[in-house]
Amino acid sequence: MSRARHKPATPAAEPAAPAAPAAIPDVRPGQSVELLKELHILTRDGKLNQDSRRKLKQVYHLYNFIEPLLDEVMNARGDLTLADHGAGKSYLGFILYDLFLKSREGDKSSGHIYGIETREELVARSRELAARLGFERMSFLNLSVEESIRSPELPEHIDIVTALHACNTATDDAIRFALEKRARFIVLVPCCQAEVAATLRKHKNESFGRTPLSELWRHPIHTREFGSQLTNVLRCLLLESHGYQLTVTELVGWEHSMKNELIIARANGQRRGNARERLESILGELNLEELRERFVY
């Protein structure tokens, strides 16, 4: 009588370990997967779709511009302060902390990021996320522009001020804050600039008799686009009149975003001699004198 042969039991498979950030295509090693999910760059199951891959590419491209500025300040001072003005969900601040400051967590003096936002619910959400991720050197402040300039919750000097897609005049508010705080660097990606275009439109008939340049904004679509370009020209002249050297370039290719202009200002203490004169001449020539307070100070 033959004996039945029993196969040895196959050991139960151990559960697969969660994928490390480096194992996810296009994500930098060491980056917080939980953060990327919260920012909707990764899907809830840790994957990248076509839209999120494009968004991640933009994030890293912007970081490549900002990282040398962070390094320069850190090497000079051994510390840095950065304020993201009009922070919204503090998308940029979280990415900068995760990629740059997180590796310096052992040194409590090596950098602090402030997110300044007027919408209280977004500030509360950012505070909760920072606490959950253990990002100790991030602060989120529910402040207006005037309050942020005077608030004791912020240091008197800020090394770097950023404003990413701060809509319409919010970019101008960030510039004013940066000048008050004597920022060494200012990084701007302007968005939805309507104020200058609205003023051009308001005085269009009068401008037709004043200057042939008014043909540049005769039609509504030209008014919108010309107004947007003109806004950034005025901002650049303002910064140059306060002693900043400028780099103006594309953030990403136009196929990714029409909100694409990147302005990086570096304080060098050398005021461009004719910047203010040119600024005032443009305001006069184009019938924009009512905006003088915003662009000349």
Image: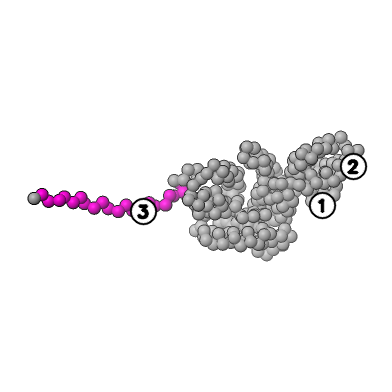
- Determine whether the residue tagged by mark 2 lies in a helix, strand or loop: helix
Which residue is located at x 63 percent, y 59 percent? 122
Q: Amino acid at mark 1?
A: Glu
Please give left or right for residue 97 compared with residue 271 in the image: left
- Determine whether the residue tagged by mark 1 lies in a helix, strand or loop: helix
Viewer-closest of 110 and 149: 149
- Determine whether the residue tagged by mark 3 lies in a helix, strand or loop: loop
Viewer-closest of 184 and 63: 63
Mark 3 → mark 1, Cα distance in angstroms: 64 Å
The x, y position of residue 119, in whole percent, is 67, 59
The x, y position of residue 9, in whole percent, is 24, 53
Check the image and report above or below for 247 versus 16: above
Q: Is residue 60 visible?
A: no
Which residue is located at x 44 percent, y 49 percent? 20
Task: Quickly name the residue at label 2.
Answer: 206
Query: Residue at the bottom extreme?
Result: 152
Mark 2 → mark 1, Cα distance in angstroms: 21 Å
Q: Earlier in the sequence, mark 2 or mark 1?
A: 2
Q: Earlier in the sequence, mark 3 or mark 1?
A: 3
Q: Residues within 10 Å of mark 2 (few under 14, many from 20)?
A: few
Question: How many numbered marks does the figure carry?
Answer: 3
Please give left or right for residue 170 compared with residue 50 in the image: right
Q: Give the dominant element type of the magenta stretch: helix, strand or loop.
A: loop
Q: Amino acid at mark 3?
A: Pro
Q: Nearer the viewer, mark 2 or mark 1?
A: 2
Residue 293 is marked as: 1
Task: Quickly name the residue at label 3.
Answer: 15
The x, y position of residue 164, in whole percent, is 65, 49
Which residue is located at x 88 percent, y 38 percent? 208
Q: Nearer the viewer, mark 3 or mark 1?
A: 3
